[in-house]
Image (cartoon, helix red, strand yellow):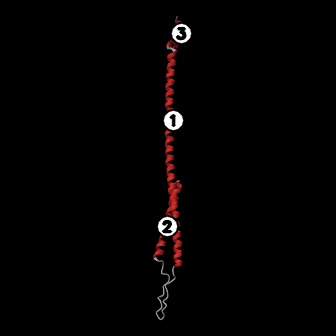
Amino acid sequence: MTALLAFLRMAWPYLLIAAIAAFISHEIDKIPYSRLQAARSADQAAWHAEEAQRQKDATDALQAQIKARLTTEANNSAVIEKLQNENAQITADRDGTLTRVRRLEQLLLVASRAAPGSGGVPQAGGGSDPPATGGDAGPTQIERLLIDAKDEAQRNAARLNALIAQIEPQL
């Protein structure tokens, strides 16, 4: 008997673990398979529901980004079209102004050629000599106005070209 007690003194922890394992496995066998299957199905259903919600959230976010981009592209197209129309109108105005300036230059040239060179010399003799002109008297008031109009048209054309150069990179 002493040999049995010596053996039990050394093996009692292992025997206790074996007894607890046997008890637990016996109790697990009492749990019906259908309950385990139902628990597993519930876990899978919850996982599928979470996955479906994540996919729906991702799809909604992507659709919102697409809608925002389409709105931005539509706005950009409208702005580009407006700028192109304004650019065409500005170009037409510039061309019209340049045409008028050239026409004024031609009229000025024709008017300067058609103007008489000097006043008539008196036909009567014995009088004093007419006073000598001290050279070119300068442009007349009409000529100054035409020159000023030409200069202003050139300044406006330069401003218009600068504005067009500034707008074109934005298109």
The number of discs equals 3
Q: Which residue is mark 1?
A: 59
Of badges 2 and 1, the one in the foreground is 2
Q: Is residue 130 above or below residue 81?
A: below
In-front residue for pair 29/7:
29
Label drawn at residue 153? 2
- Using a 10 Å C-alpha cutoff, classify the residue at mark 1 as few (fewer than 14 neighbours), some (14 to 19) or many (20 or more): few
Characterize the local packing of mark 3: few (<14), some (14-19) or many (20 or more) Cα atoms within 10 angstroms: few
Residue 163: image location, x then y, percent: 50, 60
Q: Residue furthest top?
A: 1
Vertical arrangement, residue 154 with respect to residue 65, above or below: below
Amino acid, disc 3: Phe
Neighbor class of circle 2 (other Cα within 10 Å; few <14, some 14-19, many 20+) is some
Q: Name the amino acid, label 2.
A: Ala
Name the secondary structure under disc 2: helix
Q: Identity of the amino acid at label 1? A: Thr
The tag earlier along the polypeptide, 2 or 1, is 1
Q: Nearer the viewer, residue 41 or 149?
A: 149
The residue located at (52%, 64%) in the rendering is: 96
Q: Is residue 63 above or below residue 152?
A: above
Return the residue found at the far front: 123
Q: Residue at x 52, y 73 (%)?
A: 107
Could you say which quadrant of the image residue 3 lies in?
top right
Counting residues from the N terminus, which is met first, the one under dot 2 or under dot 3? 3
Q: CA distance from mark 2 to mark 3?
A: 121 Å
Which dot marks residue 7? 3
